[in-house]
Image (cartoon, rainbow, N blue to C red):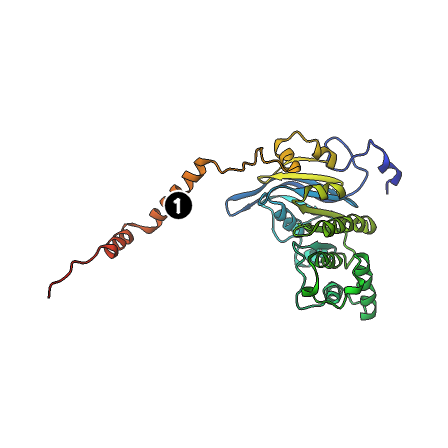
Amino acid sequence: MSDPSLLKSPAVKLAGVPGVNMPLESLVEIRDLNFTYDNRPVLTGINMTIPRGKVVAVMGSSGCGKTTTLRLIGGQLKPTSGEVKVGGQVVHELDSDGLYALRRRMGMLFQFGALFTDMSVYDNIAFQMREHTDLPEALIRDLVMMKLHAVGLRGAHGLMPAELSGGMARRVALARAIALDPMLIMYDEPFAGLDPISLSIVGELIRKLTDALGASSIVVTHDVQESLKIVDYVYFVSEGKIVAEGTPDDMKNSEVPYVHQFVWGEADGPVAFIMPISAVIAEPARLANSRAATTGPSSRTRDTETRTPRASVEP
């Protein structure tokens, strides 16, 4: 293990910075990753490194492939080419037992929490412990209360999800994500729909729990300002490619037009506010041609005949 004092040196940077060696072991390594849905490219040439004990953000506009990246890390999807390594194991090469064992060491905070609606707060958090361990119920109770205490909701163990506010539900989901002390925690839009106070609390919890557990955290988010307060490193994705990476300060000072527009929320930039007139004209024409190709002449004849009024017949 490297001397922790080395991390305080200004010469030491996070993994992923070209030409710099990081004294921390990498937990997740993504190399030359490509993924397509049918024939549509979603991710192209993705390279990422997630060090142990660090919080890394993946940012970008909707549909750029951020959540798909999480699914590839978790083994829900297999890459078209390239590889994803977690803890030294190539995820898509694992059999079902190996993947099940790897996922046991992962935690996931889904967008909007995704709590089991018919289970109490207590049972939501105890679910993983009962599923993956043979611990006695008395010990499970102690662990559940410990996780709830960590997110400040020890007194809410008897409530149902419908009785929770949005911020409380997100904190319960976070307690569930860390139930088994995972080595990797993934967050899919953890700040979506939260008021400023709840958003700040959840952000602080992500940072503190990552440090306390010694885990690695991957945060997929649109919330730039809150994320830059808590993360160690950022990857910016646009149209399935990494267009920029670096520390929060690097992102704030970035000269990449897309990153600058995204970080500062500017209306003018490479992401257009107004749809180009060419796209407005081309799309109806494309749809009309598609319908004509699939309908066929006989169908058009029948449609014409149906619409043609019959001549009236005199009695």
Image side of residue 1 versus residue 186, left or right:
right
Q: Position of residue 264 (x, y in %)?
A: 66, 36
Quadrant of the image containing the N terminus: top right
Q: Could you say which is closer to the camera, residue 101 or residue 144?
A: 144
Q: Could you say which is closer to the camera, residue 59 or residue 229?
A: 229
Name the residue: 81% across, 57% down. Answer: 150
Name the residue: 77% across, 37% down. Answer: 14
The answer to whether one can see residue 56 in this image is: yes
Instruction: Indicate whether 161 appears above or below 218.
Output: below
Q: Position of residue 17 (x, y in %)?
A: 73, 34
Taking the view exactly as shown, the residue that stands out farthest to the front is 196
Mark 1 is on which residue type? Leu
Instruction: Indicate whether 211 appears above or below 132.
Output: above
Q: Could you say which is closer to the camera, residue 86 or residue 223?
A: 223
Q: How many marks?
A: 1
Q: Could you say which is closer to the camera, residue 261 or residue 234?
A: 261
Quadrant of the image containing the C terminus: bottom left
Hey, which quadrant is residue 36 in on the image?
Answer: top right
The answer to whether one can see residue 3 in this image is: no
- Mark 1 highlights which residue? 287
Name the residue: 70% across, 54% down. Answer: 108
Hey, which quadrant is residue 156 in on the image?
Answer: bottom right
Hey, which quadrant is residue 174 in on the image?
Answer: bottom right
Determine the secondary structure under disc 1: helix
Q: Position of residue 26 (x, y in %)?
A: 76, 43
Instruction: Indicate whether 202 appears above or below 144.
Output: above
Q: Position of residue 240 (x, y in %)?
A: 59, 40
Taking the view exactly as shown, the residue that stands out farthest to the top is 255
Taking the view exactly as shown, the residue that stands out farthest to the left is 315
| Crowdedness near tag 1: few (<14), some (14–19) or many (≥20) residues, C-alpha within 10 Å | few
Instruction: Indicate whether 127 appears above or below 51.
Output: below
